[in-house]
Amino acid sequence: MKRFLSIFVMVLVIAGVVMMIPPPPVTAIPLWSTEFKMSCVECHAGFPKLNEFGMAFKQRGYRLVGQKGELLWERPGLPLSGVILGRYQNRQVDDPISRERSKAESHSRFQLDDVEIFSAGTAAPYFSYLLMAASEEGAAFTVEQGHAQFDDLLPASRMNLKVGKYWNEFFYLSSPRRLTITRYAAPVTLNVQGVELNGEWGPWRYAAGVTNDERASGTNTSAVNLNTRAQGFYAWSTFLLAEQTLGFRYINTKANSDNPSPIIDGRTRQQLEANLNLWLGPVNITPAVFYQADIGGVGGQTRRNYLIEATVEALPEKLFLTGRFELQDTAFVLNSPNNPSQANGTLVVGSVSYYLWPNVRVIAEYARTTGEGVGLNIGEDALSRALNKNIQDIFLALHFGF
Amino acid sequence: MSSSHSVRGLLGCLTSLIVFGSLGGWLGYVGAVLAASDQEVPPEYKNKAMPTGWRTDPTALAAGKAIYEGKANPEVTCVKCHGSDGKPTRMGKGALDLSDLKEHAQDSDALWFWRLAEGKPGTKMPGYKTKLTEEQRWQVVVYMRSFSAKSKP
């Protein structure tokens, strides 16, 4: 038995060593790797999170420096790719006062968290596109993004023009490209429909656009959140200095503007944000502050979100450790549907990602949410709901791109 | 044969498979990397030579610096990946360390000129032959060569 055990341990050790051996340079995701013969890590700080080079590539219209881009049918391979995230979740929900377990909300189950199918690249010289259909948590596929871009209106990607449905976000603070399973409580990514000018100018990178009003905000149903008027606008910029990035964003959008009431009076929701993307060797730290005024169209109701996330690349391109802390503070306004039932929501996440290959990772994660802002992983609009519960999640997941 | 013997035999086979498999894989990987590092200058670039006297010409050096830093042509910004001191930046992870004396001793001017013109397939290094004239490319080579001159041997 002893000998059997020692052999078993030896096999385990060898298997561990084998896993540490760097795999051959993988050109795994067909969409880009086969086209550009480059490894995933050239554009990703760790799949799916982009690095500065990946962001430049994306904003340039999926072209490398000096390339014009090819006609769709001249590009090698099938311009189709996908991402799948499957997970096991153990969730425990407690009442914070009575400490009683909510059996109805606690669960332990496997779930297909996210499936994305997309096609992107150049359709013609200096003309690029992205079409993405996604299904979250088993829901039906919807068009998550669909846009076209006229590249290089000013040379060297100084100005591009994008039209359609797309993500308004920073590449280092992106909800769909996060390394953790748990979504951000802060409004880091907004899926908008509109038109955008973007580009890079020396150390500056920018985007500014006009969009439809918010479709949903606060606790209001979609029926009162219309998406029919193009009167929202936003602008963001990042500045790169000594490999550290400073970012700012301003968003102005009418929330519930078609359904005025004594409380929801159709005011403009404004969001002001500042963040940093800092690198210290293998450590990446991202602090961010968000200030929102008149949330959900309720005059005078403000919300502050504070976020700090740190990722350590413990084993180069293999093992990533991520920790995140978020605090959400919503001001109380009489009769507002956005009022928190428990102030100062917090979210703590600890996550470990191990990359079997650059496009395949296994994730183990622990997350604890308290106070307002709970309801994460239930749905995008649930972030601002005040459920007044304590939630603990343990995830084991497999995430891969193909 | 007893069952403990067959289990031991099976585990032995498995261990050998993993050890030799991983060794073979690693050798294959090293081989592929070595093959990829083959840097033979193609015939059309082999006889290219830096204009006489340019290596120490301050005008060529200044012009090369302006191009390298993206001030002469916004579509050419070597500095983003190779750094202002010739050392690769985070964005240019894996790029050539231009301040490395060994690299300079080994590689000919023609090789540098060729790489600058055609790029390096499978890496982030693009080719600049359509963006820079031959004269400009030599100016950049002059400037890039100057990084190692500043380094201590």
Image (cartoon, rainbow, N blue to C red):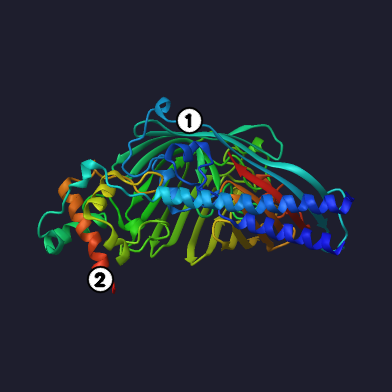
In front of the other: A206 or B136: B136
Circle 1: is it few (<14), some (14-19), or many (20+) Cα within 10 Å?
Answer: few
Chain containing mark 1: A
Chain containing mark 2: B
Q: How many marks?
A: 2
Residue A123: quadrant of the picture: top left
Quadrant of the image for the C terminus of chain A?
top right
Label 1 residue SS? loop
**Residue B120 showing in the rendered view:** yes
Query: Do the residues marked 2 and 1 share a common chain?
Result: no
* Residue B150 disc label: 2
What kind of residue is marked 1?
Answer: Gly
Residue A227: give x, y in percent of width and height: 56, 35
What kind of residue is marked 2?
Answer: Lys
Relative to B32, residue A277 above or below: below
In front of the other: A203 or B123: B123
Circle 2: is it few (<14), some (14-19), or many (20+) Cα within 10 Å?
Answer: few
Relative to A378, residue A283 above or below: below
* Residue A77 disc label: 1
Which residue appears at 78% of the width and 60% of the height? A7
